[in-house]
């Protein structure tokens, strides 16, 4: 029998110990295999539950053996002895499971029973399949019959829906016909009523006495107005359909043929009724009776869409008819002194006036919203009237466009005052337009209307802006010249050179003045931004205004450089005036030397002045370039080619200043070299390079002339190092170094050199070379290094001269000229020694 194991699986009930296994065959049932049956559990139970019972029986039959005498259990069920000899002595071995055969028969019976059970299960499964197939066929047949029934129901519902829809459409048509018939009946009734009224108006021309009470009862004014408008429309349409001109017929006595008399009488009645309503509207307005005003406005809306009432209301506002209001506006903006109040005061006055106008319009808007059926239309008329009358009146007094032929004086503000007031007025009026837009102005283009107020001024604005910049520049130049003249008057007792120096210093280029030019231009550009709404227009105006700045800066710095050059020319004239010959008296020579020193001082002063002018010129140009990069270029980019054109104009405008600076720098070099030559001529002694043979040690210090020249160059070029920059500095110092090299060569050609004099010359060359090294000009440094090498021609022995130039053939030509300056050139017969070398040179 099967039983439940501890873990819930079904197992085999083991036989008792006393009975034989074969006496209790294993009985299995189909129900034992239902549910969670497991073959592994079945056979596990057989092994774990039945087998131990057999083992217990075996243990009982072999008492006293203990653990089988240490014998090992083999996998085939037999015991293994300690040795083969022991095994043979004991005889045949005893099997470990003596009941294996019984278990085998049990398993065989179980297997047969399982096969029988499987056959029974297969038969039952086959029967179940047949039953399922029969039931499935019945079910399919039932479903098919149900589907046919549902399709029939759907068809019935579709026919019913179609019938309902048809009935509904028929009912709707009947309703439409009934409604149309009722509407036609109502229209016919109204038409009959209107015809009766029309016949009353068509009775006789100008006769409005015998009319129905509808047209005379004040309590039925709205209805009368509506009927009158309908009658007039109908009559005018009838006359137009028959092609009859109303004015030609209204004056005739015989008017019974048509509705001409009715049209005339209706027009008279409408006019009279409109006037009555307007009078009532005015009376209600005086009393602030908004209810009655609203009723009148609603009725008047039937006459020309209420335009007459709207215009009448707006025109009757105190701000349009009260002269005291207009005078108060003028005093608020212009003040008691007129335009002398200034742009800032005018700005405050306009702000106050426009604030008062906005508040007035806001109050009127509240009334309009409560009274008129179409408040937006009334607000459009009101705001338009405010801009065209009240604002235009103050702008006409405020903005008086000056003539470009006769400009207003600068001391009275000039064109700049007009432009500033124009900008203030435009900006404040634009703010007013935005405020009015927020309050409400219907469909009115308030911004466009505001722009139209300034069209007459904006058309010629660019010309006025440029003329103003030119006027400011001219006034500034007059002011600067007056300052220079005043300074010159204070130096009337000074000497000419002193006065010239002071005058020159007062006419120097000023970066402050150029900054003022830029400030004027910035203000003008801000107005361009204000008045130019389109990018193309803005770029054009900005370009023209910036061109004015370029012209001003170019002219100013060019004139400043030319004035600085004049001082250089005066110094050069002084130098040439005091050049004297050699055959003069000592007194004349001393006076000439003194005058030459004064001319040198003037030259040094003019050199410094010009360098300062160049420095300020460069600073001014840098200011303009920075201003262009920061403020102008971005405004020109929207227009193709405008930026490049302005850059080209800027380069062209500065070309004249560059030319003046170049000429001046050349004159500066001439001035410096003239003083260098004067110092060399005055300070260089013939004995400097021909040391007397008195037994004293040779002097290895630089000559006095060299010391004076280097000191002068260090002093005068200090300002050049500061004033010049970059390539300008390099070019100037390179040119000066080359001129100095050439001047020294020509200077030394006038002297004769001994061996010790050659050493001193080399010391001078070293001193000059160390100074010019500060120029950072490699080509100049190389020339002075070659001068040091060339000075060796005075030091080496005559027989070594031929080998002196083997390493430096480039200086051979100049060296041959220097060799001839040797003190022993003739005595040592050096010419014959260098015949070959001189022929090659």
Image (cartoon, rainbow, N blue to C red):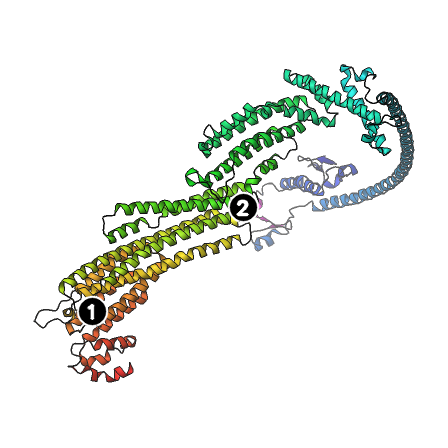
Q: Earlier in the sequence, mark 1 or mark 2?
A: 2
**In the foreground, 732 or 150:** 732
Instruction: Give the residue number, with chain letter if any, for mark 1.
Output: 762
**In the foreground, 572 or 659:** 572
Image quadrant of residue 661? bottom left
The residue at the point 16 percent across, 78 percent down is: 824
Residue positioned most to the left = 695
**In the foreground, 512 or 16:** 512
Does the image show residue 33? yes
Q: Percent position (x, y) of residue 404?
A: 50, 44
Q: Residues within 10 Å of mark 1 (few under 14, many from 20)?
A: many
Q: Percent position (x, y) of residue 177?
A: 90, 27
Image quadrant of residue 4? top right
Q: Which mark is residue 538?
A: 2
Task: Answer above or below: position of 615 versus 421.
Answer: below
Q: Nearer the viewer, mark 1 or mark 2?
A: 2
Q: Which residues are magenta?
A: 67-79
Q: Is residue 392 magenta?
A: no
Q: Would residue 465 appear left or right of 23 to someone viewing this image?
A: left
Task: Answer above or below: position of 716 versus 830.
Answer: above
Q: Residues within 10 Å of mark 2 (few under 14, many from 20)?
A: many
Whether label 1 touches label 2, CB < 8 Å: no
* Cα distance in 3D space between marks 1 and 2: 68 Å
Q: Percent position (x, y) of residue 155?
A: 91, 35
Q: Percent position (x, y) of residue 832?
A: 21, 85
Task: Answer above or below: position of 182 versus 428.
Answer: above
């Amino acid at each position: 029998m099967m039983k439940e194991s501890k873990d819930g699986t079904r197992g085999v009930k083991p036989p008792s110990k006393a009975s034989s296994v074969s006496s209790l065959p294993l009985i299995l049932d189909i129900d034992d295999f239902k549910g969670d049956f497991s073959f592994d559990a079945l056979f596990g139970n057989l092994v774990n539950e039945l087998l131990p019972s057999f083992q217990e029986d075996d243990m009982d039959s072999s008492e006293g053996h203990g653990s089988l005498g240490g014998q090992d259990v083999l996998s085939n069920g037999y015991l293994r002895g300690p040795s083969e000899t022991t095994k043979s002595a004991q005889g045949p071995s005893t099997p470990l499971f003596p009941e294996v055969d019984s278990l085998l028969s049990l398993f065989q019976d179980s297997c047969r029973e399982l096969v029988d059970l499987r056959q029974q299960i297969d038969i039952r499964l086959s029967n179940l399949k047949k039953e399922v197939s029969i039931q499935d066929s019945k079910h399919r047949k039932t479903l098919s019959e149900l589907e046919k029934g549902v399709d029939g129901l759907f068809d019935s519902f579709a026919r019913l829906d179609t019938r309902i829809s048809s009935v509904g459409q028929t009912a709707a048509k009947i309703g439409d016909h009934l409604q149309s018939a009722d509407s036609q009946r109502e229209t016919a009734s109204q038409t009959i009523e209107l015809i009766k009224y029309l016949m009353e108006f068509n009775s006789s021309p100008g006769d409005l006495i015998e009319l129905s009470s509808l047209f005379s009862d004040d309590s039925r004014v709205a209805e009368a107005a509506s009927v009158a408008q309908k009658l007039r429309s109908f009559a005018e349409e009838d006359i137009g359909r028959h092609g009859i001109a109303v004015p030609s017929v209204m004056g005739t006595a015989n008017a019974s043929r048509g509705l001409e008399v009715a049209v005339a009488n209706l027009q008279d009645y409408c006019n009279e009724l409109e006037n009555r309503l307007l009078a009532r509207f005015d009376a209600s307005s005086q009393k602030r009776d908004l209810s009655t005003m609203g009723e009148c406005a609603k009725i008047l809306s039937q006459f020309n869409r209420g335009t007459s009432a709207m215009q009448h209301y707006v025109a009757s506002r105190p701000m349009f008819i009260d002269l005291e209001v207009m005078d108060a506006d003028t005093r608020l903006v212009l003040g008691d002194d007129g335009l002398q109040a200034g742009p800032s005061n005018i700005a405050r006055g306009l702000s106050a006036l426009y604030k008062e106008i906005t508040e007035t319009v806001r109050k009127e808007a509240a009334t309009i919203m409560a009274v008129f059926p179409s408040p937006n239309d009334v607000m459009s008329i009101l705001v338009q009237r405010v801009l065209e009358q009240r604002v235009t009146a103050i702008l006409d007094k405020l903005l008086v466009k000056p003539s470009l032929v006769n400009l207003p004086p600068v001391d009275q503000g000039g064109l700049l005052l007009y432009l500033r007031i124009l900008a203030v007025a435009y900006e404040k009026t634009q703010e007013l337009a935005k405020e009015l837009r927020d309050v409400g102005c219907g469909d009115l283009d308030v911004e466009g209307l505001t722009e139209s107020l300034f069209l007459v001024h904006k058309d010629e604005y660019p010309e006025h802006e440029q003329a103003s910049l030119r006027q400011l520049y001219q006034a500034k130049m007059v002011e600067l010249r007056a300052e220079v003249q005043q300074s010159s008057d204070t130096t009337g007792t000074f000497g000419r050179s002193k006065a010239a120096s002071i005058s020159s210093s007062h006419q120097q280029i000023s970066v402050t003045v150029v900054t003022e030019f830029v400030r004027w231009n910035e203000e003008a550009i801000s107005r361009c931004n204000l008045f130019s709404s389109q990018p193309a227009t803005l770029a054009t105006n900005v370009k023209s205004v910036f061109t004015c700045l370029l012209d001003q800066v170019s002219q100013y710095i060019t004139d400043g450089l030319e004035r600085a050059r004049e001082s250089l020319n005066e110094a050069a004239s002084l130098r040439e005036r005091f050049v004297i010959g050699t055959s003069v008296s000592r007194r004349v020579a001393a006076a000439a030397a003194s005058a030459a020193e004064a001319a040198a001082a003037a030259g040094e002063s003019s050199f410094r002045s010009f360098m300062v002018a160049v420095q300020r010129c460069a600073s001014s140009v840098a200011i303009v370039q920075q201003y262009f990069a920061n403020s102008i270029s971005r405004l020109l980019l929207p227009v193709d080619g405008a930026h490049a054109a302005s850059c080209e104009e800027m380069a062209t405008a500065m070309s004249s200043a560059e030319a003046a600076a170049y000429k001046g720098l050349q004159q500066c070099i001439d001035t410096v070299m003239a003083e260098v030559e004067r110092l060399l001529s005055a300070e260089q002694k013939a004995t400097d390079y021909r040391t007397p043979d008195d037994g004293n040690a040779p002097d290895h210090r630089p000559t006095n002339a060299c010391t004076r020249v280097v000191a002068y160059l260090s002093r005068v070029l200090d300002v050049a190092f500061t004033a010049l920059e970059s390539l300008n500095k390099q070019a100037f110092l390179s040119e000066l170094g080359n001129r100095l090299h050439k001047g020294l060569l020509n200077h030394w050609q006038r002297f004769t050199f001994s061996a010790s004099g050659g050493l001193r010359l080399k010391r001078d060359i070293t001193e000059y070379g160390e100074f010019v090294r500060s120029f950072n000009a490699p080509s100049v440094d190389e020339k002075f290094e070659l001068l040091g090498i060339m000075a060796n021609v005075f030091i080496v022995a005559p027989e070594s001269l031929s080998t002196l130039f083997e390493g430096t053939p480039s200086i051979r030509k100049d060296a041959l000229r220097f060799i001839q300056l040797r003190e022993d050139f003739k005595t040592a017969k050096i010419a014959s020694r260098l015949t070959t070398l001189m022929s090659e040179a």
